[in-house]
Amino acid sequence: MGTSTFAERLSQIQDEVAEAAHRVGRATEDITLIGVSKRKPVEDMQQAYNVGLRDFGENRAQEVRDKFPGFNPDGIVRHFIGHLQSNKVKYLPGRVDIIHTIDSTRIADAVDQRFGGQDLCIPVLVEINISGEANKEGVEPAQAMELAAYCAEKPNLQFQGLMTIGPLTSDAARIRRAFREMMLLSEQVVKQVGTSGKTAILSMGMSSDFKIAIEEGATHLRVGTALFGAREY
Ligand SMILES: *Cc1c(COP(=O)(O)O)cnc(C)c1O
């Protein structure tokens, strides 16, 4: 990525999103590009905002606590996309607009209580381990319906859809199969559980596989490296 500017990278990715959407007859407006800004300073996020990025993704509760609300310009949407522990949920109310990673009833309860404590209602997605890989967060596909229904019953959670991380492989056919399964699962869950009148969300696709994700029905892409550059851990 060398000397390219953020604006150039954003515009490049937006073109690729539009092309992939076009290939399968989808409208670009139905696809949201989330810039995953984890481990990147607020200055980089401000720069991204200045050239039009509005959706930001973070995966650590403490980083959310430190970055927001210091950075909270008009119109941004703050996505929490990381694994969540009950004792860290307290950092999130008022600092995130949606949580992609509900993976147990315990976490659903913790989020419901913490947001409810501040009279807030938070949209949530259920994270699915679609490829069955060990060490992967998320519930098995067979448990999706139950956990989604559980979230939908909670007074301070709005169930809005599913999220997954694609299989860690360079085998495009395997990635596509996983995303296709997610789309089918998402349709079943949304049909049965509903999304309280909101548009269903299917969050999948990262820097290496977002084009496949678009072709298979993703509504929200989580792109870090391809936009913000490599991360230092
Ligand atoms: C870091 C991260 C991303 C972005 O990954 P890139 O490969 O840098 O695009 C997407 N989703 C989740 C859950 C992440 O933690």
Image: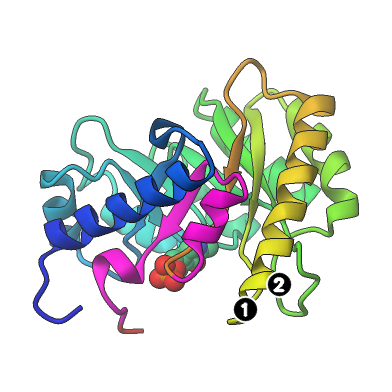
The quarter of the image holding the C terminus is: bottom left
Element carrying mark 1: loop
Q: Which residue is mark 2?
A: 174
The picture places residue 19, in percent across and down from the top left corner, at: 38, 50
Is residue 216 inside the magenta stretch? yes
> Range of the magenta residues?
208-231
Decide: is 139 above or below 122: below
Residue at (13% x, 56% y) in the render: 7
- In the foreground, 71 or 137: 137
Q: Amino acid at mark 2?
A: Arg
Decide: is 21 above or below 57: above
Q: Which image quadrant for residue 121?
A: top right
Residue at (37% x, 55% y) in the render: 64
For marks 2 and 1 on the same chain, the one whose residue lies earlier in the sequence: 1
The picture places residue 228, in percent across and down from the top left corner, at: 25, 67
Is residue 229 inside the magenta stretch? yes
- Coloring scheme used: rainbow
The quarter of the image holding the N terminus is: bottom left
What's the mark number on residue 168? 1
The picture places residue 10, in percent across and down from the top left corner, at: 22, 56
